[in-house]
Image: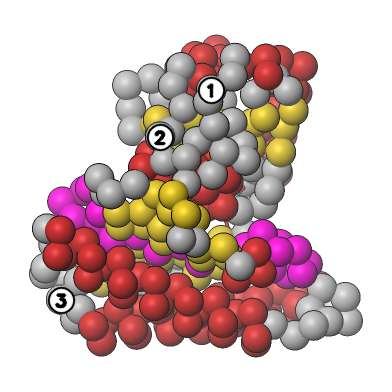
Amino acid sequence: TERLKAELLEIALEAATRAGAFLRDGRPDDLGVAATKSSAIDVVTEMDIAAEKLITGLLADRRPDDGLLGEEGASVEGSSGVEWVIDPIDGTVNYLYGLPSWAISIAARKDGETLVGVVHAPMRQETFRAVLGGGAFLNDRPARVRPAPELGLALVGTGFGYLAERKARQAEVVRRMIPEVRDIRRGGSAAIDLCDVAAGRLDAYYERGLNPWDYAAGDLIAREAGARTGGRPGEPVSPELTIAAPPPLFDHLQTRLEELGAWHD
Ligand code: IPD
């Protein structure tokens, strides 16, 4: 498996770097302003789809028997047992507005276990990567969580879904949380938020309603950097709830989120 992991990492890095250059260089400068809102969104959607095709094309070329799961619809069973989980642009709204925090997220998993994760943020010139059991890295330096503060001193990242009803519910949880922590951040890319926990730039992160392609790579990177990750008590990270923080902050945040009903819509 060590050889397999090294091979998967190399391919993931190549795919992410290529898609990153395509998305950075291909983004019209006036995307957020000149075009009408709906046509700007169409351009982003086209870039998103083209980037996913670029990534899945490269993966299928190198490892034709692997499965594929992508935000823009890629879905291939595969026969090798390895499955790639791909978000061509995580942080789509940041990309639309010209904010730098968007990333390509690529994970490879086997038998339900994530072996490799890469989160590449071209405008931040940052590539996070991790291999199961091999630690996490930001560019070429090891990434490490910061020592856990108590909840009252924690800088906590979170995010919101796209639907109004869910956002209202999430806002209610944030309203309760703000006075109980140092502050809240909403960065706009779940993959980068998880990596920011890994790099000690956030103490913790949580969000309700993510998809596997949003968290698959960042989850491994956060864990390899010393964070605990999970969902509701006793459960792994899932679309229901994603939490990342070093212990014992993880437990305190998880308990509080449970009390606030953070997984409800
Ligand atoms: C979104 C981002 C955002 C999170 C949303 C996600 P997308 O992913 O990760 O930070 O709050 O829940 O849907 O749509 O930009 O790939």
Residue 54 visible to an observer of this rendering: yes
Q: Which residue is the site of mark 1?
A: 148
The local secondary structure at tag 1 comes to: loop
Left or right: residue 39 versus residue 252 is right
Could you tell me if the residues under marks 2 and 3 are in contact, i.e. CB atoms within 8 Å? no
Q: Residue at x 39, y 49 (%)?
A: 136
**Is 7 placed above or below 175 here?**
below
Disc 1: CA contacts within 10 A as few (<14), some (14-19) or many (>=20):
some
Q: Are marks 1 and 2 in contact (CB under 8 Å)?
A: no
Q: Evaluate if marks 3 and 1 touch, with contact meaning CB atoms under 8 Å apart.
A: no
Establish if 8 lies above or below 205: below
Q: Nearer the viewer, residue 200 or 63?
A: 200
Q: Is residue 111 above or below residue 261?
A: below
Which residue does the numbered mark 2 point to in the structure image? 226
Q: Is mark 2 within 8 Å of ligand 1?
A: no
Left or right: 251 as drawn, with respect to 162: left
Q: Earlier in the sequence, mark 3 or mark 1?
A: 3
Q: Looking at the picture, which amino acid does disc 3 mark?
A: Asp
User: Along the line of sight, which residue is nearer the eye, 241 or 154?
Assistant: 154
Mark 1 C-beta closer than 8 Å to ligand 1: no
- The alpha-carbon separation of the residues under discs 2 and 3 comes to 33 Å
Q: Quadrant of residue 55?
A: bottom left
Residue 257 numbered mark, or none: none
Secondary structure type for disc 2:
loop
State the extent of the magenta-drawn residues as a range: 94-115
Q: Nearer the viewer, mark 2 or mark 3?
A: 2
Give the residue type that dot 1 points to.
Ala
Badge 3 local density, few (<14 within 10 Å), some, or many (20+)?
Answer: some
